[in-house]
Amino acid sequence: MTMQHPDQTSVSDRRDLVILGGGLVGMTLALAAARHGITSHVIERADPADLTAEGADGRASAISSASWNLFRHIGLEEALEGLGCPIESIAVTDAMRPGRIDFTPEAHDGTLGRMFANRDIRLALFEAARHEPNIAWHTQVEAVKRERGDHGVAVTLNTGQVVEGSLLVGAEGRRSPSRDEDGIGLVSWDYSHRAIVAGLYHEKPHKGVAWEIFYSAGPFALLPLNDTEDGRHRSALVWTVPEKDAKGVMGLSDHGFIAEVAKRMDGLYGKIELSARRMSYPLSYQNATRITGHRLALVGDAAHGMHPIAGQGLNLGLRDVGALVQVLSDGMRLGLEPGDAQLLKRYENWRALDNFTTMSVMDGIVRLFGVPGRSASAIRRLGMGAVQRMPTLKRFFMNEARGMSGNLPSLLQA
């Protein structure tokens, strides 16, 4: 099926961008570009109804302050306001032992971000896209051929339709065919762990606290969600387990699973029960050796995939969106076309340092907290105690969590 606006015919119209992948990052890019007068074709293999069905995806995402600014600037504030749970503070602890770090901002600094159900973000994005004439949204179709020439790009769909543009954008996720076809290399390694994601109801309120509890087998994160309409307290769970144990954990009965989760929560929120079904996915690090090619730009997980330890994966992809839209809109005002090599070089240079730095820090934290043994735990807690006593260092980490450091695109600024 191809979803088209009433003023479009079945004949392909040439647009500025051809975006392969209409997920959270791809559709945000299409909307942000549209708000700057940049037109796009969005190619998505899935059915939006399946992606937004109740219970289809129990995952939640931490949206940084910078990413929230982006959503506001592209007109999603009204649809999303009130759906995100403010992250008032972050508690970091080594297996619930003494010596934790509390990241709590000053009142005038606002929160550290907001937790949104992925489904709510998708619903807001898809509804906005349906009413945006600058977006031609093609769903339940696949790209079977990608061509990039001197004068533009053309993508042949499995329906036989050909869509054309100036720039091809790979937003297909970690297994990006666009990246692989261009011969772009990956720096990658497997963490040999899986993330098990679930929703929890709990007896005691979370008070807006996001918990990152580090066990030697892997991190155990509790992320605050808004209470239900009938007042039930909720959090999202992201539990990292070794690959060899994952099948056993996923195979537990709901009762057995809750018992294992409760053991690691140590009574933190009182009695708990499942609020959303369990999902699991493998964890790896991958960073593209470059994020551009001839008339090609990569965004989101096609460019970089990281451990979910600090919930920064989506935020990093949204910074790609902000930078690419700013580079393209600046260039188009000067008469350059979106596929111009100068513009792509500027995008590459802008994103390279931020991507590398953020991913290296996240990988370092994964490795530091994954070292087993009592002496390693004692050293970690000593370091955490030092950070707890250093306001300047804590502020640095909080600014990173908000996404407010570095050279931010204008779309991500207040």
Image: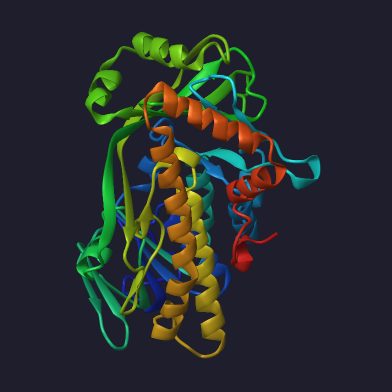
Where residue 47 sits: x, y (%)? 34, 47
Q: Is residue 31 left or right of residue 145?
A: right
**Eyeballing the image, is 284 above or below 72?**
above
Where residue 202 sits: x, y (%)? 55, 15
Q: Residue at x 26, y 43 (%)?
A: 190
Looking at the rendering, in which quadrant would you find the C terminus?
A: bottom right
Please tell me which residue lies in front, 142 or 294.
294
Q: Is residue 72 left or right of residue 138?
A: right
Where residue 118 sits: x, y (%)? 48, 41
Q: Look at the image and name its color scheme.
A: rainbow
Where residue 102 sits: x, y (%)? 65, 32
User: Which quadrant holds residue 390?
Assistant: top right
Looking at the rendering, in which quadrant would you find the N terminus?
A: bottom left
Please tell me which residue lies in front, 6 or 331.
331
Q: Residue at x 48, y 21 (%)?
A: 95
Camera sees residue 10: yes
Q: Residue at x 39, y 56 (%)?
A: 22
Q: Residue at x 37, y 9 (%)?
A: 255
Q: Is residue 54 left or right of residue 287?
A: right
Residue sitting farthest toward the bottom = 335
User: Which quadrant holds residue 153?
Assistant: bottom left
Please tell me which residue lies in front, 328 or 263.
263
Please tell me which residue lies in front, 270 or 371.
371
**Eyeballing the image, is 345 above or below 383?**
below
Camera sees residue 52: no
- Tell me how many marks there are: 0
**Eyeballing the image, is 262 above or below 133?**
above
**Eyeballing the image, is 104 above or below 410?**
above
